[in-house]
Amino acid sequence: MAGPTQRVPLLDINRDNKPHRDEFVEALAAVVDSGRFLFGPDVVELESEIATYCQVDHAVGCASGSDALLLALMALDIQPGDEVIVPSFTFFASVSCITRLGATPVFVDICPDTFNVDPECIADAITPQTRAIIPVHLFGQCAQIDRICQIASEHDIPVIEDAAQAIGAAYHSRPAGSWGLTGCFSFYPTKNLGGMGDGGMLTSGDAAVADRMRLLAGHGMRPRYYHQAVGINSRLDTFQAAVLRIKLRHLSEAIEARAQIASRYMRLLENAGMVGPDQIVLPTEDPAAFHVWNQFGIRVGEQRRDALRTHLAERGIGSEIYYPVPMHRQECFQYLNVDGASLPETERASREILNLPIFPTLTEAEQETVVDAIAAFYRAGAKAAA
Ligand SMILES: *Cc1c(COP(=O)(O)O)cnc(C)c1O
């Protein structure tokens, strides 16, 4: 995470939280006084508010987005020998949930414009062993979830949406987390709805699936000390829920601010003459998607990405690479023997992606500093080449 000495931090959670500090302190004090640190009323209320927000009938709190994914697969009784289709260009947790259950991830490539999983690659990867599909709504923009759900339903395969980065996003006006059998959300502090610690949520339109996930999140125990299944201990605590309820009330404004920052970056970078295949490729918005801009990811061509990142760092500007090593290249997944040549867009994205600072209280002046620094990098490069 960005340090306080940076001129333009990648992220400044304190600045985002400051306007709501009194609300947080009041709500947290109420939890202290209630003594109900787990299963408090705020947890029940947050579940119901998230269900409404995501337009689903059921929501189940859990300890993290990673646990949400694991619980979703556990509810499907995923077993060794089962295959689960997932993009390789994602965060680790989209994949570890599969291997933890002894099942096999089947990695598929992404669309070069959105960085999201390519539905046609999913269709090609389906086998008689496929038991689930995990599309990831990367950077705050939904994958082509209508097409993915259509492909899945033709084969009667459940879809688990990894919506960790995409709360509030939608596709054809239908919210992320309401398309699949289950939606998985994270309240990790850097997510658009970030708590003050870990937290997660599962959504589902299916009462039996939601009930099964709730059972598995509580040691499979029902009634008390009688265990129907071997579950895990995965709870959303009341402190997190109290904070998240406040942040949920301000989420639309935060998304609006992110969208404005994204369009301002596009305008500033265009105006600076930075946009082009040899320089920077701007992020693409799918016209069917409502993008919530958890990340602003540009492509930097000609293998100059790392040099640009260093240049920015030298000027006190934060940036990050999401993700430098795709999952099929991770040491822990080498046993899967995946040939990188089968995932060319994933490989290219991991070489070219650069994520610029974006958070709701980022200022216009800070954005100008970022764009000026990028322009200086390319001017210096042009001079060196001349
Ligand atoms: C953050 C994230 C997760 C995991 O969420 P945690 O709450 O940190 O466990 C899963 N998938 C994606 C795509 C994420 O970005």
Image (cartoon, rainbow, N blue to C red):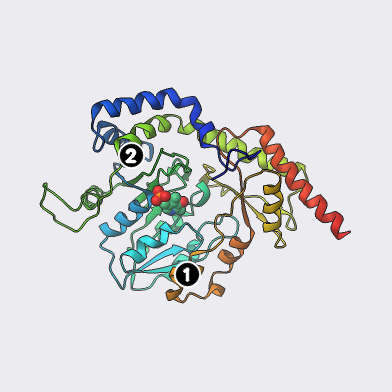
The amino acid on which the numbered mark 1 sits, given as a three-letter code, is Glu
Q: Quadrant of residue 261?
A: top right
Question: What count of labels does the image hold?
Answer: 2
Query: Label 2 CB, ligand 1: below 8 Å?
Result: no
Structural distance between the alpha carbons of marks 2 and 1: 38 Å
Q: Quadrant of the C terminus?
A: bottom right
Residue at the (58%, 54%) spot, across then down: 321
Above/below status of 254 relative to 1: above
Q: Quadrant of residue 46?
A: top left
Crowding at dot 2, Cα within 10 Å, few <14 / some 14-19 / many 20+, comes out as many
Instruction: Look at discs 2 and 1 and give the one toward the viewer.
Output: 1
Residue 49 visible? The answer is no
Coordinates of residue 255 in the picture (x, y in percent): 51, 36
Above/below status of 278 relative to 165: below
Coordinates of residue 140 in the picture (x, y in percent): 50, 46
Coordinates of residue 269 in the picture (x, y in percent): 72, 44
Residues 9 and 170: in front is 9
Q: Quadrant of residue 160?
A: bottom left
Coordinates of residue 49 in the picture (x, y in percent): 33, 34
Secondary structure at badge 1 equals helix
The amino acid on which the numbered mark 2 sits, given as a three-letter code, is Ala
Above/below status of 193 relative to 234: above
Residue 94 visible? The answer is yes
Question: In the orientation shown, which residue stands out farthest toward the front?
Answer: 5
Above/below status of 13 relative to 327: above
Closer to the chain start, of discs 2 and 1, is 2
Residues 382 and 196: in front is 196
Crowding at dot 1, Cα within 10 Å, few <14 / some 14-19 / many 20+, comes out as few
Determine which of the numbered discs, if any, sits on residue 200 in the image.
none
Q: Which residue is mark 1?
A: 331
Q: Which residue is mark 2?
A: 51
Residue at the (85%, 60%) spot, across then down: 385
